[in-house]
Amino acid sequence: MKKCLTILAIGLFTLPTYAQRTQEVVTAELAFAQHALDHSVRQAFIQYADSQGVVFGGGKVRKALRMFTAMPESPISLLWHPAFSGMAKSGELGFTTGPYTSQAHAPLPDTSITAGHYSTIWYKNKAGQWKFLLDIGINYPTSLYKQQELYQASNERLVPSSHAVLGQVMDTNALAPEMVFIRKFQSEGLSVYRQVIMPETWFNIEGQQPVTHVEDVEKDLSRIPGTLRFKPIAGGMSESRDFAYVYGTVTNEGKQEFYLRVWVHTSLGWKLLLQTLRS
C-alpha cells in the first residue's frame, strides 16, 4: 500500500528551491492519505484539517473539524494519492488533485464502493504545519487509483498580480479574477474558457474522468453546459499574489452543487490551472 501511495514520478523541475517547495504540498497529501490507512479516515481529516477548513456534503459547505469530530468511525477505507499539484511562489499555498477509491471490508472484503478524483487546497500555517483549507471530490465509474502518476506544474512563469486585470482595479482579492471570468462566461459562454486555459489546465467534472492538457480541455468544453450559473462563496490568495483559489455554488436547471477553481497569474494575466465541477 505504501508503494502505491508514494508514486512520485516527478518531472520538469527547473530550480531546486521550487522542487523542494512543491514537494512539501505533495508530502503533506501523501501523509494525509497514509494517516487514513494507518488510523482511519475520520482521524486523518481531524489531523490535517485547518480550523477553517471546509468539506462538502449534503448540499452544504461544512466545517471539516466539526463534521469529522462528530462523525463515528467507519469500516470503509479511503485510498488516494496526488496526480497533479501546484503551488504559489511564496510557498505557503498550493493544491493537489488525484484519484481516490473507497473500499468496504465487510461483508465483502476490499469491495470498491466509489471512485473519483479529489481536489485539496493546502495552506502552510505560522507553525510550519500543512493543513487543508478545502477538500472536494467528484465521482466517476472506474477507478484510476493505480493508473495515474504525479505531475507537478512549474511556477516559474508565475508573476505577482498588482494592477488591472481585464479592466479591473487592484487585483489583490482572490475573487477578482473569478468575478471577471463569471461575467464573461455569462455574456460570451464557453468561449471564455479558451481565453484562460493554459497547457497544464486540468478539469475534474462530475461523472467523467479528468481531462488534462489544453488540447483535450478545448475538445471537452462542449460537455460543460453553457447554462451554468456560478456564485462564489469564498477563496484565498497567496502572499506572492500569483495563486488564488475560489469555491462556490454552481446551479444548472434548478440543481445546485459546488465548484472549485484555482487561478495562477502569469505575464499574460490570470489563467485557470484547475477546475472541479460537481454539477
Image: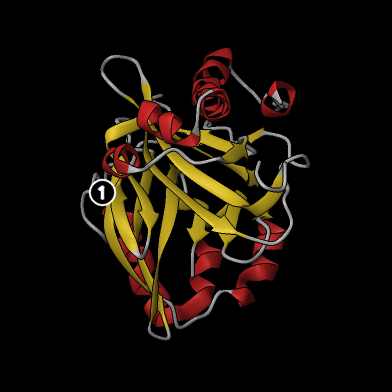
Kindly give the residue lying farthest to the bottom in the view shown: 253
Helix, strand or loop at disc 1? Answer: loop
252 or 202: which is nearer to us?
A: 252
Q: Give residue 166's quadrant in the image.
A: bottom left
Q: Residue furthest right?
A: 147
The local crowd at label 1, few if under 14, some if 14 to 19, many if 20 or more residues have their Cα within 10 Å, is: some
Which residue matches tag 1? 171
126 w.r.t. 139: above or below: above
User: Residue 60: x percent and y percent?
Assistant: 31, 61
**What residue is drawn where x is 31% and y is 45%?**
67
Please name the residue shown 74% across and 22% down the image.
Answer: 3
Name the outermost residue toward the left.
169
Viewer can see residue 131: no
Left or right, residue 117 beside residue 237: right
Percent coordinates x, y for residue 44 in the rendering = 45, 30
- Tell whether 117 sits left or right of 44: right
Q: How many marks?
A: 1
Identify which amino acid the numbered label 1 is placed on: Asp
Looking at this view, is 232 or 69 the one in front?
69
Which of the image's four quarters has the N terminus? top right
Tell me, yes or no, if residue 61 can be seen here: yes
| Quarter of image, res 165 | bottom left
Write the residue at 35% across / 36% down. 160
Q: Residue at x 30, y 32 (%)?
A: 50
- Residue 91, percent from left and from top: 41, 24
